[in-house]
Image (cartoon, grey):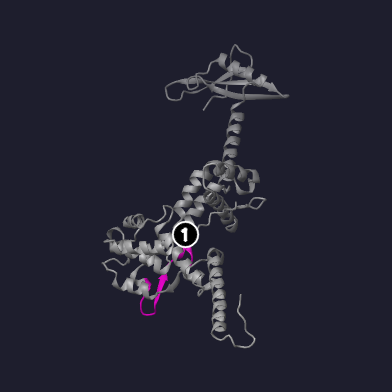
């Protein structure tokens, strides 16, 4: 502890007191300055002789700086540091309370990790949204932000991909609003119109060649994979997940578990599908078409592409998804299946998805109408004497 006695120096306003030396024997000087500022006389300790390498001359320079306002006092420095610390804490707290689009994505991903499309969503977010919008809060977005994203993406991506990216952004914002994590933007996010609905079909000749090549295929797993899609209209992923326990031979149904992220449904086990599954080879795996090690299959059997090429099908025909369209087209064009029934068979969540086949049913109705005309003409031709009847033109 420093003594109370003051010792003058050759510099006015600078004095020292003596105290036990820190870290060594003997005593050392502790220098102080006295000055007037804003009408008040201030006294401040400016440093120790050895610890701070303080001298009367240095203390005098500090005194001059303090008088001229060039150097804050240690108290002011402490107050400044404390204010900066509090400001930093407030900033961090505000950041913790900010639900940016990037933070919403992390929370959304955590709560929806079970969704099979989450990996594709993560690629879309990282590639197209994170850099431009990741640090923004939804409430701060303006229409121009989305216009810039859309215009940039349209230069290199397909329209459907652009729509998927913007739909992901809208989904993240709606997620945050629903969970009461953030406020939404002041405008409605509009989705670009995409005219890329593709309904693949095969002519009778093409279908015949395909079935012929399927019959030739020695890989029974690949051949039956294609047959089952054609007989049932199941999606590729649904066939991947199909287990023997999902096939109800007694009641005549196939249970479709988690069809494209929706609730589980069931479709009829028709005679062709029943015969195929009853004759299909079984292994120790629970899956009808097992992958490596007997687990769930994650990729399409390679022979399927070879079958497509051997049948001479168009290059843009997707062997499995295309067969699903063939199944739906055949039913719609038969005229015997209404759109609601077709929707249930295809496990479409919305009737709008089934409307792409409506024109085929219209053609079937026209053929039925023409058949009625032909039947009337036949009846009239058989009995020209029938009163009140004439040929229908």
Residue 317 sits above or below residue 257 on the image: above
Q: Quadrant of residue 212?
A: bottom left
Segment colored magenta: 246-263
Measured as percent of width and height from the top left, residue 190 is found at 62, 52
Q: Is residue 7 visible?
A: no
Residue 191 sits above or below residue 375 on the image: above
Residue at point 62%, 81% (across, down): 390
Q: Is residue 259 magenta?
A: yes
Q: Quadrant of residue 91?
A: top right
Residue at point 44%, 72% (across, down): 266
Q: Residue furthest right?
A: 39
* Residue situated in front as seen by the camera: 288 or 314: 314
Residue 251 sits above or below residue 155 on the image: below
- Is label 1 in a helix, a strand or a loop? loop
* Residue situated in front as seen by the camera: 23 or 223: 223
Measured as percent of width and height from the top left, residue 123 is found at 46, 48
Measured as percent of width and height from the top left, residue 115 is found at 46, 58
Q: Quadrant of residue 36?
A: top right
Q: Is residue 312 visible?
A: yes
Measured as percent of width and height from the top left, residue 7 is found at 58, 17
Q: Residue furthest front?
A: 385
Give the residue pinned by disc 1: 200
The answer to whether 21 appears left or right of 370 in the picture is left
Quadrant of the snapshot with the C terminus: bottom right
10 Å neighbourhood of mark 1: few (<14), some, or many (≥20)? some
Residue at point 57%, 37% (across, down): 85
* Residue situated in front as seen by the camera: 235 or 390: 390
């Amino acid at each position: 502890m420093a003594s109370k006695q003051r010792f003058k120096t050759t510099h006015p306003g600078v004095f020292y007191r003596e105290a036990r030396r820190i870290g060594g024997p003997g005593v050392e000087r502790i220098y102080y300055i006295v000055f007037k500022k804003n009408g008040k006389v201030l006294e401040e300790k400016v440093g120790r002789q050895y610890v701070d390498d303080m001298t009367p001359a240095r203390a005098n320079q500090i005194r001059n700086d303090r008088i001229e306002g060039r150097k804050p006092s240690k108290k002011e420095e402490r107050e400044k540091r404390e204010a900066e610390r509090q400001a930093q804490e407030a900033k961090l707290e505000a950041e913790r309370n900010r639900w940016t689009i990037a933070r919403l994505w992390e929370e959304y991903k955590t709560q929806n990790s079970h969704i099979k499309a989450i990996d594709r969503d993560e690629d879309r977010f990282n590639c197209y949204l994170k850099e431009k919008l990741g640090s923004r809060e939804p409430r701060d977005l303006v229409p121009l932000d989305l216009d810039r994203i859309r215009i940039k993406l349209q230069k290199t991506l397909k329209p459907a991909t652009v729509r998927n990216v913007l739909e992901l952004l809208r989904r993240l914002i709606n997620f945050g609003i629903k969970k009461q994590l953030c406020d939404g933007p002041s405008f409605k996010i509009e989705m670009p119109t995409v005219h890329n609905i593709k309904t693949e079909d095969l002519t009778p000749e093409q279908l015949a060649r395909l079935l012929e090549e399927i019959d030739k295929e020695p890989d029974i797993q690949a051949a039956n994979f294609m047959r089952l899609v054609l007989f049932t209209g199941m999606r590729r992923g649904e066939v991947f997940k199909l287990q023997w326990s999902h096939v109800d031979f007694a009641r005549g149904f196939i249970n479709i578990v988690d069809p494209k992220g929706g609730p589980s449904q069931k479709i009829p086990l028709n005679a062709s599908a029943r015969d195929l599954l009853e004759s299909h080879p079984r292994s120790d795996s629970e899956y009808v078409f097992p992958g490596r090690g007997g687990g769930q299959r994650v990729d399409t059997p390679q022979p399927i592409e070879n079958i497509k090429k051997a049948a001479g099908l168009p290059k843009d025909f997707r062997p499995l998804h295309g067969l699903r369209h063939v199944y739906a087209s055949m039913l719609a064009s038969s005229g015997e299946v209404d759109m609601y029934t077709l929707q249930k068979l295809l496990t479409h969540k919305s009737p709008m998805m089934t409307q792409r086949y409506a024109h085929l049913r219209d053609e079937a109705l026209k053929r039925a109408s023409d058949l009625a005309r032909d039947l009337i003409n036949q009846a009239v031709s058989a009995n020209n004497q029938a009163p009140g009847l004439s040929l229908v033109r």
